[in-house]
Image (cartoon, rainbow, N blue to C red):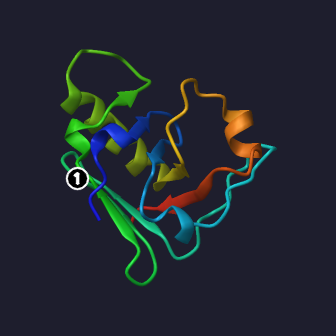
Amino acid sequence: MLLEPENTLFIRGATPVLLLAGAPVHDALPPLIAPDGAVPSCEGWSIVPRLTLCVVDGPGDHGVVVPALAAPVVGGADDDTASSGMGEWCADAEQAGGAVVMSLDRLPEALDWSALLSSGAARGGFMPAPA
């Protein structure tokens, strides 16, 4: 399934995050509750981060493709080019060996990690990137 880039948010960091809103895989993902901030692994799922497309692949027929180059990226240096932001996010994911994928009903207006990780509304976890 293709997920529109406006329903995603790529967040740079030592462990990068991909937020998905209204994703067709939402119910297939495990509940993500990590009040202490230690995000669990998402067993059976993986992420393939690439500059133009990002693939979240799950068991069976579950998965989603994001046109990454058109998606918003936050965090890190801002040099006004989408490709450099996405390229840096992909580098973050490569360095971390994957990314945290968090599925929500809708994207939050503000990133309040403690609320997102303890509300019970999020689904997902850390997904490894295949070598």
Question: Could you say where residue 91 lies in the image, as x and y percent from the top left?
Answer: 34, 42
When asked about the image quadrant of residue 56, the answer is: bottom left
Q: Which amino acid lies under the numbered mark 1 shown in the image of this protein?
A: Leu
Horizontal arrangement in the rendering, residue 105 relative to residue 61 (left or right): right
Res 131 seen here = no
Res 76 seen here = yes
Q: Residues within 10 Å of mark 1 (few under 14, many from 20)?
A: some
Front-most of 25 and 67? 25
Horizontal arrangement in the rendering, residue 114 relative to residue 55 (left or right): right
Front-most of 46 and 124? 124
Residue at point 41%, 74% (across, down): 62
Tell me the quadrant of the picture where the N terminus can be found. bottom left
Horizontal arrangement in the rendering, residue 111 relative to residue 13 (left or right): right
Mark 1 lies on a secondary structure that is: loop
Question: Could you say where residue 108 lies in the image, as x and y percent from the top left?
Answer: 55, 32
Judge whether 3 appears above or below 80 on screen: below
Question: Could you say where residue 113 lies in the image, as x and y percent from the top left?
Answer: 67, 34
Q: Which residue is disc 1 drawn over?
A: 53
Judge whether 124 appears above or below 30 on screen: above
Residue at point 62%, 63% (across, down): 41
Judge whether 81 appears above or below 127 on screen: above
When asked about the image quadrant of residue 36, the answer is: top right
Tell me the quadrant of the picture where the C terminus can be found. bottom left
Q: Residue furthest right?
A: 36
Total labels: the figure holds 1
Horizontal arrangement in the rendering, residue 79 relative to residue 62 (left or right): left
Residue at point 20%, 22% (across, down): 81
Front-most of 60 and 50? 60
Q: Residue furthest bottom?
A: 60
Question: Could you say where residue 53 lies in the image, as x and y percent from the top left?
Answer: 22, 52
Residue at point 59%, 28% (across, down): 111
